Amino acid sequence: MLGLLFITFIIGRVMPVDPVLSIVGESASKETYDAAYKAIGLDKPLIVQFATYIWDVITGDFGVSLLNARPVADDIKRVFPATLELATLGTLIGVFVGVPLGVIAAVKRGSWIDQIARVLALVGYSMPIFWLGLVSLLIFYGILGWVGGPGRVGIFYVDIVPEVTGMILVDSLLDRNWDVFRDALSHIILPALLLGYYSLAYISRMTRSFMLEQLSSEYITTARVKGLSERAVIWRHALGNIKVQLITVIALSYAGLLEGSVLTEIIFAWPGIGSYITTALLSADMNAVMGGTVVVGLVFVCLNIFSDLLYKYFDPRAK
Amino acid sequence: MINFKPILAGAVLALATGMTALPAAAETPANMLVIANRIDDITTLDPAQSFEFAGSDVSRNVYGKLVNFDPLDLTAGYQPDLAESWTVSEDGRTITFTMREGVTFHSGNPVTAADAEFSLRRVIILNKTPAFILTQFGFTPENVSETIVADGNTLSITTDKRYATSFVLNCLTATIGGIVDMKTVMEHEVDGDMGNTWLATNTAGSGAYSVQSWKPNESVTLVSNPDFYLGAPAMERVIVRHIQESATQRLLLEQGDIDVARNLNPEDISGITGVDGIDVDSELRGRLMYISLNQAHPVLSKPEVREAIKYLIDYEGMQDSFLRGQYTIHQNFLPATYLGAIDDAPYSLNVDRAKELLAAAGVEGLEIEVGVREAQERIEIAQSFQNTMALAGIKVNITVGTAKQILGRYRARELDVYLGAWGPDYPDPHTNAGTFAYNPDNSTEAGATGLLAWRNSWDTGGLTEMTAAAVVEGDRDVRAQMYGDIQRKFLEISPFAVMFQKIEQTGRRSNVQNLGLGGAITAVSYWPVTK
């Protein structure tokens, strides 16, 4: 974590964007510029700035955004749930479609299902998300009108349900407001499918290769010889044995989505942490950048701990 | 053991219900205006500090000012707003405003001269970035108690010397002239900040709207003020959504999920042109694109060379190709729609004429560096410039850098040639005249980095005096004439080749009427809008 903080700090300082200039504007007088320069502490030595920063983070204070004059913690509280909601749904789609697809592709190796799965994954890897996002918006929103457009909810439903978690799907469920839920679902479904597709591409390929390894093991042959049904062999024995590996893969892909996928967020006007950090970086709003980075770092750490716990649960040897 | 089947079936079911049976919203509600815009430049909502486009858009609809522009007739100039009338003292230094009776703030407090006194003094005392718009009249934190004074129903402001009344009043129409609700603001004062922190995210005005919420990079929601003194606005809610992508804005507009799309690129503009139910508006903005020649350069300072280079720019070619719909040819430092603006455009690409001039100056084998910021359109202009200059045998090396790098060198007078944009700071001709054509001390020690003339080491050849005279001329029409004269001379002798003025193209649902974007001089106005 400290290393992460250090690197972002250094990057922020060597970046050729002048944070003062982005606050006061190009035509500010020298006095205003100097006052702002002092106010954000840039006149102090680098090491002092870094130490001050570390101390603030430890005490839970990310500072105030240089750009919008609000506490960074408040901003993150606002943008992170949006990303969490999207990434979670995307990962769920990735898992529930990707794992079975991977398993079937491994079992029916070389069949048309395997080929389709391969093409799907390949396309998922290589298609620019920017393009895919726009085209799917055009088709499903623009032409067919099946889904809600960009943004988290339609304007009718903005700020209607009380904010509890910040995730509109959850909040509307808690409030039992089905209209808002449906609207929010119609807005999230397309970006979630898109992200789900990307994580599906990864998860299904990994599942397939894990499964192939298992299926050629001796215990599988034993199980078959024992007369177990093919279903039990594949879904219980083989899949059961790759759970731990799968969890690592899924956790990684989930963490990737939780960093916020900037392009998806921009196309779908999704106010998440990815575009938040990017905007902050481009205008050298270092408090916001570092606040965002710390949160992303924390997410990684938490997911690691969580998947370790799952290992213990699933793998008797780890107990 | 995980059994996938039921979960999978559940997921498919959930997707299916999510994706069907949702009627596409054909249009936004009749009392609501929904706008897509890039609003990531809003840093604060405090009128004493706000100095960005999207911030001015909010402020103009929230804060009343002493004098203001009529959105439906911008050319009429400033008009009474919270001040009903004003008189000017004989020495021209004191303007006394009589406040309009019966206007209230959103809080219900009456708008009084004391609020106006507080608001203007606050600007001077806080001294944020845009404060120079008022401090240029000699107001200081020390003297405001004598120079900005409320007395009963009147407010008097006294400048340090005589200025054109139109100059002072034009400046008061800027965002910085917004009158805040003293009582409400001071209730939220923290550590003597005069409510600066609170006003950054809240509003306390008397205008047509108040801000219900501002979520940075997400949305600004305004709700109408039913007691607005000009009548309750037809649009009861205005939602400005931050949509970064042009293509996304276009989709939303075509679907009728938004009423106005403000950041459409030329491809998307041509895509929606002629579509049923959508209109495209073109509005002139204040931003100018120019090339300037450093007069410390031994060759670039020759009058013939300056003139020759103005003939080596392909104004029309650029306007009709990559700048189409984004910029229009404009060769004077006052943007069209400003007081005193003229539309003389004597220069066009003329290589032969340029060669003659260069020969007359005895110039051969000239090689110069042009500094430009890493923005697509600027780089394209630089490349066009490079090509046309080559036609006359001048080699141009383009240096592309970040804003900080290029501006840093420009401000330090280090660039041979600068290619960039300039936007006026406030709606008075002096904002541009005072920087393009004004440079009282051209010495390096003067360090007048804010003046474009100084940045180019140009002593202005007498325009400084003419500009100073125009600033104190009391008669608005005479003053406009004076700026006309300054610009004609500027066109001829200056080292600036002003090339283009910005056009903003907006996609609008045809049922939305009377949406004034504010032209070059002010910001958008929502209160006259009807659907």
Image (spheres, coloured by chain):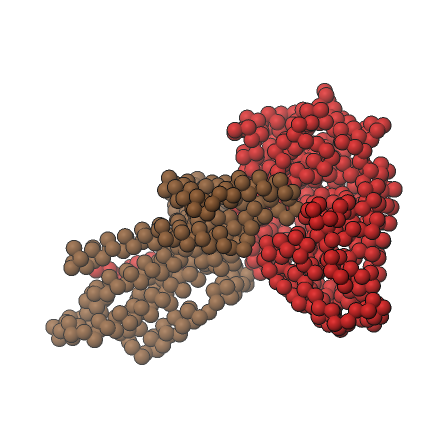
Chain colours: A brown, B red
The one nearer the camera, B96 or B61, is: B96
Q: Residue furthest left?
A: A226
Which residue is located at x 25 percent, y 70 percent?
A: A211
- Tell me the quadrant of the picture where the C terminus of chain A can be found: bottom left
In the image: residue B24, left or right of residue A96: right
The one nearer the camera, B40 or B232, is: B40
Q: Is residue A59 above or below residue B489?
A: above
Q: For the image shown, how many numbered marks are present on the structure?
A: 0
The one nearer the camera, A203 or A143, is: A203
User: Residue B462: x, y in percent?
Assistant: 84, 49
Q: Residue furthest top?
A: B152
The one nearer the camera, B364 or A61, is: B364
Which residue is located at x 68 percent, y 43 percent?
A: B525
Which residue is located at x 45 percent, y 44 percent?
A: A49
User: Residue A63: x, y in percent?
Assistant: 45, 41
Q: Is residue B228 above or below residue B324?
A: above
User: Residue B199: x, y in percent?
Assistant: 57, 35
Q: Quadrant of residue B387?
A: bottom right
In the image: residue B364, left or right of residue A25: right
User: Residue B313: x, y in percent?
Assistant: 76, 65
Which residue is located at x 80 percent, y 36 percent?
A: B163
Is residue B26 at all visible to an observer of this figure?
Answer: no
Q: Quadrant of residue B346?
A: bottom right
In the image: residue B406, left or right of residue B483: left
Is residue B296 at all visible to an observer of this figure?
Answer: yes
